[in-house]
Every structure is written in C-alpha cells, then in structure tokens.
Image: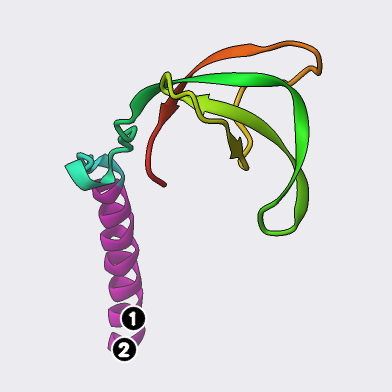
C-alpha cells in the first residue's frame, strides 16, 4: 500500500518537475554572439569596359568569355566568371562598375 502511494506521489512530482522545466526553458532568451552574425565582405569597386562580343577562351574548359579592360587599362583580357546581375547582349559595349570581393 505504501509502495503504491509512494509511486503515485513520485510520478506526480516528476510530472510537475518536467513541466516546470519545460516552461522555464521556453522563457530563456539567448542573445546571438558577434561571430554568429552575418557580415557582408568588404569589396573593392572596379570599373570595367566590356567588349561588344564574346570570344572563344579556355578556363576550366572551352567556353565563351567577355573581353574586358580593367580599371582604365588599355589591354584587353578575358573575364572568365559570371557577373551577378549582369545580362550580356551582343552588339553593345559596356561600362561596368563591379564590387569585387574575395570568396
């Protein structure tokens, strides 16, 4: 008889303790640390002049590349990467201001 009463009280106390723990855990707020915050990398604004057509080039494999002059240079070079937000159309020369940053 005492054993049943003890088990009943123990289960009741255990249930109350678990509910109280869950309620308290739900009330805790955690401030994000500085290292968890997303930071935008600081880049360098570079002016490019883009040619009016794409040229055959070889990067990782054969591809078509935009020929560019970087930062007022007189020499043309191939631009192997995509430029986010830029949609090339043949027949136009482009003046591009690109925010370059290391990956």
Residue at 34% over, 32% down: 40
**Circle 1 residue:** 7
Badge 1 marks a residue whose secondary structure is helix
Left or right position of 57 against 77: right
Question: Could you tell me residue 87's position as x and y percent?
Answer: 71, 20
Q: Is residue 39 magenta?
A: no
Left or right position of 99 against 27: right
- The answer to whether residue 77 shows anywhere in this view is yes
- The answer to whether residue 33 shows anywhere in this view is no
Q: Is residue 86 above or below residue 59?
A: above
Badge 2 marks a residue whose secondary structure is helix
Question: Could you tell me residue 10's position as x and y percent?
Answer: 29, 75
* Residue 3: assigned label: 2
- The local crowd at label 1, few if under 14, some if 14 to 19, many if 20 or more residues have their Cα within 10 Å, is few
Residue at 63% over, 36% down: 82
Which segment is the magenta one?
A: 1-25
* Residue 101: assigned label: none
Question: Could you tell me residue 99's position as x and y percent?
Answer: 42, 25
Q: Is residue 26 above or below residue 82?
A: below
Q: Is most of the magenta stretch helix, strand or loop?
A: helix
Q: Is residue 6 above or below residue 39?
A: below
Frontmost residue, 40 versus 55: 55
Left or right position of 78 against 39: right
- Give the Cα distance between marks 2 and 1: 6 Å
- Mark 2 touches mark 1? (CB < 8 Å): yes
- The local crowd at label 2, few if under 14, some if 14 to 19, many if 20 or more residues have their Cα within 10 Å, is few
Residue 101 sits in quarter? top left
């Amino acid at each position: 008889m005492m054993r049943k009463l003890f088990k009943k009280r123990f289960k009741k106390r255990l249930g109350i303790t678990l509910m109280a723990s869950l309620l308290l855990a739900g009330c805790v707020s955690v401030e994000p640390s500085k290292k968890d915050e997303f930071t935008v990398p600081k880049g360098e604004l570079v002016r490019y002049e883009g040619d009016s057509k794409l040229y055959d080039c070889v990067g990782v494999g054969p591809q078509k590349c935009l020929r560019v002059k970087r930062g007022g240079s007189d020499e043309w070079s191939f631009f192997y990467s995509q430029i986010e937000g830029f949609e090339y159309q043949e027949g136009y020369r482009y003046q591009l201001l690109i925010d370059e940053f290391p990956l």
